[in-house]
Amino acid sequence: MNRFTNRKIILSDGQTFSGYAFGAEKDVILEIVFNTSMAGYQEILSDPSYTDQAVVMTYPLIGNYGMAAEDYESDAPSVGALIVRDYNDAPSHFRSEKTLGDVMRRFGIVGISGVDTRKLNRSIRDHGSRLALLTSADTPLEEGLARIAAYSPPTDAASRVSCKTVYQAGSEAARYHVVAVDCGMKKNILRSLCGRDCRVTVVPWNTGAETILSMKPDGVFLSNGPGDPMDVPETVRTVQALLGKAPIFGICLGHQILSLAYGAKTYKLKFGHRGGNHPVKNLKTGKIEITSQNHSYAVDADSLSATPLAVTHINLLDSTVEGVACERDRAIGVQYHPESAPGPQDSEYLFDDFIRLMKEGN
């Protein structure tokens, strides 16, 4: 180990990687994952779906354009840590207001730079995402492994990042009223809905169906969020009670929750999908969309045969389910992020499809 490095990553299988501290400097145990996006580290940092995870960026240079107030996807970033090859603490961009390191220190987010991210990402690709201890360089390996072995990952991530009270977004004069169930919703989803003549009432993750229906929504939106969809059975039961009573649109975790509500099953992927270049085929149009993705879990394709859901999109890299729909109930879900931020904008039409479902119901 370089004698000047002051931080270390210990993986649960005993592999170690050395580096330098930036952001908050504290010991944390997190699930380690990677993201292949070449830009958009601010949106990644502030995406609530990364709660309790250490994100390794495959793109080597991070921090070079700073942080801008308009680009946050949540007000209080909750990602566990950011691991990079080359951290730039002197950003050069006219919109930059703070450095990445400053923001990470403010929110207690651990950073390690100078890491051999190519080797680390190959390890995640080959052996899967797993627990890692981010610690001081002088922590003994045996001690680190013992701490990892004794650690129990939390299962309440969605409840921690969900809103605590109901709030409104958009104009009162908007044509459509959408109730959005917040399991860790990104801000650009609200922008995408409000920009399509929607007034959005955002409710906490565990809001009941009766309360949602009392708000007389034209449609219900199920947001993205962190963790295993089986950790939010309350939300699944809510959606079961809403099926057929209003159009429903689910993104990412919301897509998984929708599928579970119909009786499908989900499973954890080896290392997940995270990045801005995942090719997805729309089975209805035959077109290929380049998509933004961030998830560890997927819907079991075989389990859908016992449900009224039809597969609408598939991932061309591994053939996993990327979209489902129930025409009878006017319900649709996609595993990826049509609102992007960051990422390509090939899939924004899905918000228009949701508007069409609400229009047909009026």
Image (tube, rainbow, N blue to C red):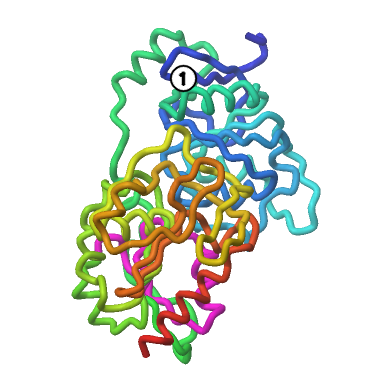
Q: Give me the residue at 48% from left, 45% from top.
A: 319
Q: Give me the residue at 74% from left, 48% from top.
A: 65
Q: Position of residue 155 (x, y in %)?
A: 29, 41
- Left/right placement of residue 335 relative to residue 61 reads left
- Left/right placement of residue 183 relative to residue 120 reads left
Circle 1 packing at 10 Å, graded few (<14), some (14-19), many (20+), is many
Q: Give me the residue at 52% from left, 27% from top.
A: 124
Three-letter code for the amino acid on which mark 1 is drawn: Leu
Q: Is residue 313 above or below residue 44?
A: below
Q: Give me the residue at 45% from left, 26% from top.
A: 27
Q: Position of residue 261 (x, y in %)?
A: 25, 59
Quadrant housing the N terminus: top right
**Element at badge 1?**
strand
Q: Quadrant of residue 6?
A: top right
Q: Position of residue 15 (x, y in %)?
A: 50, 14
Q: Is residue 199 above or below residue 40?
A: below
* Front residue of this view, candidates 95 and 344: 344
- Left/right placement of residue 139 relative to residue 64 reads left
* Front residue of this view, candidates 347 and 78: 347
Q: Is residue 202 above or below residue 264?
A: below
Quadrant housing the C terminus: bottom left
Magenta stretch: give its range: 179-206
Q: Which residue is mark 1?
A: 11
Q: Position of residue 213 (x, y in %)?
A: 24, 79
Q: Is residue 189 magenta?
A: yes
Q: Is residue 229 magenta?
A: no
